[in-house]
Image (tube, rainbow, N blue to C red):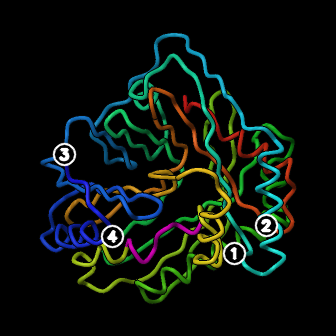
């Protein structure tokens, strides 16, 4: 099985890109676990979809099902939230993506949930975890690198929901910080960085509800030899700014101290290199199996202006099945 440590994984990805070999890659949040495989050697219990690139059909659910969420206690969430606010006041972070894992119960299998998901970007990995992500990470095509940071969520059923989310001062500040972070990150690996589109709305299905999420589009120009440096590029850009925070290094350190579990693959990235271009997504909207139980990992960005109750509700609102 092509699992690699950090250094081995980055080198293997570089080598596959240098030979123009099409491959799949999965990089965990802390980059200590990397999976990569040439597509023609990919195990038959790994399925993916990245837009129009996929190796599996959608298979709608043809039976009734249930989903039970065993939510964490609000006071447990508030304890972590309050610690983050103190870190912000001390100047150690300005934006931090706080996440928790929630045990869920359902009579659907991981493969059934994956198959029925209508997400743009999704991954099924060996009956260990699935993700059905709405968020691109980076694309590279014709020597242009693009990233699409997503930050800001609202219930689409609210009156004037789009106007509310776009005019919200806290949400605007949070989004600007992520755009600045991703502009700086792209500047490490590319030139001529531009914000092509700022704060546009995507609509996604969240079970029986609909959510609006806010994204931006940032681009840069790559050198012709980027294919042989894919591993290094991904290393420089991860963890993704939208699921860590800013400034990135100190914020990641605070996350490690405050969150009470190991994120693992959650909030890492996955993608496909097809021999000429690269497409990838952030591993969010994530369910994993551990000791026969299912856990859903979710969260959201915290700033000085955040309201604890609202952030708790956003975290729980993201726990859904994507049908």
Residue behind mark 4: 141
Q: Is residue 235 magenta?
A: yes
Q: Are marks 1 and 2 in contact (CB under 8 Å)?
A: yes
Q: Residue furthest bottom?
A: 191
Which SS class for mark 1? helix
Crowding around mark 4 (Cα neighbors within 10 Å: few <14, some 14 to 19, many 20+) is: few
Crowding around mark 2 (Cα neighbors within 10 Å: few <14, some 14 to 19, many 20+) is: many
Labels 2 and 3: the sequence-earlier one: 3
Q: Splitting the image into 4 quarters, where does residue 155 fall?
A: top right
Between the C-alphas of marks 4 and 1, the distance is: 26 Å
Mark 2 or mark 4: which is in front?
Answer: 2
Choose between 149 and 198: the one closer to the eye: 149
Q: What residue is drawn where x is 28% and y is 79%?
A: 226
Q: What residue is drawn where x is 46% and y is 12%?
A: 62
Q: Residue 123: image x %, image y %?
A: 39, 43
Labels 1 and 2: the sequence-earlier one: 1
Residue behind mark 3: 42
Task: Specify start and end residues of the magenta stretch as a single range.
Answer: 234-241
Which SS class for mark 4? strand
Crowding around mark 1 (Cα neighbors within 10 Å: few <14, some 14 to 19, many 20+) is: some
Is residue 180 depicted above or below 12 in this figure? below
Which SS class for mark 2? loop
Q: Is residue 31 left or right of residue 272?
A: right
Q: Splitting the image into 4 quarters, where does residue 215 fall?
A: bottom right
Mark 1 or mark 2: which is in front?
Answer: 2
């Amino acid at each position: 099985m092509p699992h690699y440590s950090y250094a081995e994984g980055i080198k293997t990805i570089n080598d596959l890109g240098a030979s123009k070999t099409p491959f799949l890659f999965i990089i965990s949040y802390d980059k200590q676990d990397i999976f990569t495989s040439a597509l023609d050697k990919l195990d038959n219990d790994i399925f993916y979809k990245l837009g129009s690139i996929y190796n599996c059909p959608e298979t709608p659910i043809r039976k009734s099902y249930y989903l039970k969420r065993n939510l964490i206690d609000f006071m447990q969430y508030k304890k972590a939230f309050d610690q983050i606010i103190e870190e912000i006041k001390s100047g150690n972070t300005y934006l931090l993506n706080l996440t928790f894992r929630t045990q869920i119960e359902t009579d659907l299998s991981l493969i059934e949930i994956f198959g029925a998901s209508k997400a743009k970007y999704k991954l099924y990995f060996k009956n260990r975890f699935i993700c059905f992500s709405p968020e691109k990470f980076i694309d590279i095509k014709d020597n242009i690198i693009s990233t699409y940071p997503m930050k800001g969520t609202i219930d689409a059923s609210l009156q004037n929901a789009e106007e509310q989310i776009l005019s919200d001062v806290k949400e605007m500040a949070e989004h600007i910080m992520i755009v600045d972070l991703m502009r700086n990150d792209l500047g490490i690996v590319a030139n001529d960085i531009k914000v092509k589109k700022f704060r546009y709305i995507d609509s996604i299905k969240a079970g029986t509800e609909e959510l609006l999420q806010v994204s931006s589009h940032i681009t840069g120009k790559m050198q012709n030899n980027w294919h042989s440096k894919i591993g290094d590029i991904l290393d420089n850009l991860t963890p993704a700014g939208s699921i860590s925070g800013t400034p990135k290094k100190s914020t990641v350190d605070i996350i490690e101290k405050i969150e009470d579990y190991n994120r693992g693959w959650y909030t890492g990235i996955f993608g496909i290199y097809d021999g000429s271009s690269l497409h990838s997504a952030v591993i969010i909207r994530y369910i994993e199996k551990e000791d026969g139980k299912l856990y859903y990992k979710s969260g959201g960005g915290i700033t000085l202006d955040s309201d604890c109750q609202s952030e708790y509700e956003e975290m729980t609102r993201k726990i859904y099945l994507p049908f």
